[in-house]
Image: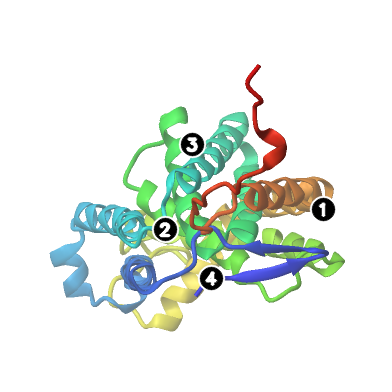
Amino acid sequence: MTTVTKSGPHTIRAVIALRWPSVVTIALAGVVGLVGFTWPFLASAEFVRSHGNDTPWLFAGLLGLLCLVCLAEVSSGRLDPKTIAVLGVAAAAGGGMRVLSAGTAGLEPLFFVIIVAGRVLGPGVGFVSGALALLTGALLTGGVGPWLPYQMLCAGGVGLGAALLPVRAGSRAERWLLAGYALVTGLLFGLVMNLWFWPFLGVGAQSAMSFVPGAPVAENVQHYALFYLATSLGWDLPRGVLNAILVLAAGPALLRVFRRASRRAAFGVPARFEAAEHDPTTRQVAS
């Protein structure tokens, strides 16, 4: 089913509607990512000792699943040249925004582009463009490492969520809801991302912020909450505030640009060739 929203006299269609191959691959990537992020709270001490070095396998699995999402869209015929061009522009814009700051003091304006692109172009493009924007930014800034698939998955989720927000396109409520979403996801990105490395910082150390293998879930949750407040909140809050301000200040203009481009590109409209009717006014008279 194609996502349709109305804004004034125009009808805006999502570039990539979520069909079943995409739903399955995104859901599978989400499940694997959920396990990859939350395993410290569920694993026993014996499991940590036996499988604590299995992170590279998870890296490969997540990266492979993210590639499968793109392949699912190609196989379903939704990624035509126009859509690929839009994906390239969104990914390049997001990657370029990251080059401007490289995450300094938590300031990462690329999420502003991911949110707007996902909101206008649909959940499929939102997920893929978010992941590709992080990949592009990592390649440009030399930020490739075991954390990259986690970042790609989180950024893809940000774009996907922006497309699913229940608000009428073009309304004033949309602008404020997207700003609030930018603020919340700016905080959640850091809250979730820290989980990939937190278990390996002083495992078993007698500290109120350390991961304790095999400890009760409530105890490790409390330790992680203290760790986040002490080390990450000061970086994540500027990220959320910056992107919320960008949505309020420049969001309406960028939303109009993306929506105008999607209307003119006529995504999903099949090409039709019709024979031209005979027009007697165009006949040439032989001299």
233 left or right, relative to 17: right
Callout in the foreground (2, 1) = 2
- Based on the displayed image, in which of its 4 quarters is residue 190 positioned? bottom right
Residue type marked 2 = Arg
User: Is tag 4's residue or tag 1's residue first in the polypeptide sequence?
Assistant: 4
Q: CA distance from mark 2 to mark 1?
A: 31 Å
Q: CA distance from mark 3 to mark 2?
A: 25 Å
Q: What residue do we see at 65% from left, 43% from top? A: 109
Q: Position of residue 4 (x, y in %)?
A: 63, 70
**What percent of the width, then of the height, locates residue 213?**
29, 71
Q: Residues within 10 Å of mark 4 (few under 14, many from 20)?
A: few
Looking at the rendered image, the quarter that the C terminus falls into is top right
Q: CA distance from mark 4 to mark 3?
A: 30 Å
19 and 230: which is toward the camera: 19
Marks 4 and 3, the one that precedes in the sequence: 4
Viewer-nearest of labels 3 and 2? 2
Res 186 seen here? no
Question: Disc number at residue 2?
Answer: 4
